[in-house]
Amino acid sequence: MSAVTFVSKLKDDDSLTIPKSVVEELGLHPGDEVRVYVEATDGTAVQADYDRVIADILDEASRLKPVPRPSSSDTHEDAFGEIMKAKFRKQGFEL
């Protein structure tokens, strides 16, 4: 995937323009999808994007189910496993 950084001013209709040189460099055509990362000129990133990504990750993690494993003869390994289970339960994950 190619990436180019450029600055564009927000228009009155809340749209942005991709410079022609960028369109040509990336070989874009009408109907092509592009990923846009928005950052204000003062350097602050759009928090909503981060919040959405974190929510998606936590949602996916909540659907994970542990895979049963055979019991171990290593008492240290068993103890570590119990500690990890306790940590996951504390964070609200069901095991």
Image (cartoon, rainbow, N blue to C red):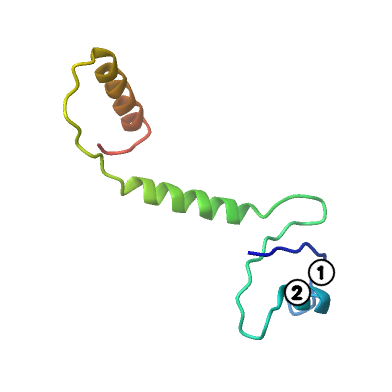
Sequence-wise first label, 1 or 2 = 1
Which residue is at the front of the view, 23 or 52?
Answer: 23
Which residue is at the front of the view, 20 or 56?
Answer: 20
Left or right: where 1 falls relative to 61: right
Left or right: where 61 falls relative to 54: left
- Residue at which label 2 appears: 16
- Residue at which label 1 appears: 8
Q: Amino acid at mark 2?
A: Leu
User: Residue at image x 79%, y 71%?
Assistant: 10
SS of the residue at dot 1? loop
Q: Amino acid at mark 1?
A: Ser
User: Residue at image x 31%, y 49%?
Assistant: 63
**If the image is split into quadrants, where does the C terminus sit?**
top left
SS of the residue at dot 2? loop
Q: Position of residue 4 (x, y in %)?
A: 75, 64
Residue 57's mark? Answer: none
Left or right: where 67 falls relative to 87: left
Q: Position of residue 65 (x, y in %)?
A: 26, 43
User: Residue at image x 38%, y 51%?
Assistant: 60
Q: Position of residue 26 (x, y in %)?
A: 72, 73
